Structures are given as C-alpha cells and as structure tokens.
Image: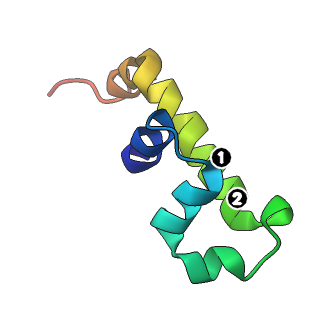
C-alpha cells in the first residue's frame, strides 16, 4: 500500500503502479479497463490514502494497549 501511495504521489499512473507491483507481463495479459489488477491497484491507493489522511488512528484504536 505504501509503495502504491508513494508512486501515485510521485505522478505515476495506476497502470505504472500495477506494473511495478504485479509485473508488466501480468498487467499486459488482460485488458486494462476490466482487469482485476486494475481494481486491486485502485483499492490499494484508495485505502492507503485513507490511512495517510488519519485513518491509521482508527486502525490503532482496534488494538488496545496491554
């Protein structure tokens, strides 16, 4: 997730991010617009941005100190 966010903030396209995460061959094997890897990449960036924008606090609250 962090790699996806860093790449997106650096100006990489979602396809470029998918190629870096999953490999060019896997990304090229399916039509991009309907690819499951496209959906996974979009979700990684979306969910990662939620964490960056403060969502990590919600995640931390799920694990009380012992």
* Category of crowding for the residue at label 1, using alpha-carbon neighbours closer than 10 angstroms: few (below 14), some (14–19), many (at least 20): some
For residue 53, above or below residue 63: above
> SS class of the residue under badge 1?
helix
* Category of crowding for the residue at label 2, using alpha-carbon neighbours closer than 10 angstroms: few (below 14), some (14–19), many (at least 20): many
Residue at the extreme front? 11
> SS class of the residue under badge 2?
helix
Residue at coordinates 78% horizontally, 77% vertically from top-left?
A: 30
Q: Nearer the viewer, residue 64 or 52?
A: 52
Q: Are marks 2 and 1 in contact (CB under 8 Å)?
A: yes
The quadrant of the image that shows the C terminus is top left
- Residue 44: x and y, percent? 55, 46
**Colouring convention used in this rendered image of the protein:** rainbow
- Residue 29: x and y, percent? 72, 83
Residue 26 shown left or right of residue 57 in the figure: right
- Residue 20: x and y, percent? 47, 64
Residue 47 shown left or right of residue 31 in the figure: left
Exactly how many numbered labels are in the figure? 2
| Residue to which mark 2 is pinned | 38
| Residue to which mark 1 is pinned | 42
Q: Nearer the viewer, residue 50 or 12?
A: 12
Distance between the alpha carbons at the discs numbered 2 and 1: 6 Å
Residue at coordinates 51% horizontally, 40% vertically from top-left?
A: 8
Q: Nearer the viewer, residue 17 or 57?
A: 17
For residue 13, above or below residue 54: below
Residue at coordinates 38% horizontally, 25% vertically from top-left?
A: 56
Q: Can you tell which mark lies on residue 53?
A: none
Quarter of the figure with residue 65: top left
Q: Nearer the viewer, residue 20 or 63?
A: 20
């Amino acid at each position: 997730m962090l790699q996806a966010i860093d790449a997106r903030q650096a100006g990489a396209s979602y396809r470029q991010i998918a190629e870096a995460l999953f490999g060019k061959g896997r990304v090229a094997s399916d039509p991009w617009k309907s690819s499951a890897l496209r959906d996974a990449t979009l979700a990684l960036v979306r969910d990662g941005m939620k964490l960056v924008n403060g969502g990590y606090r919600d995640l931390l609250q799920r694990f009380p100190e012992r």
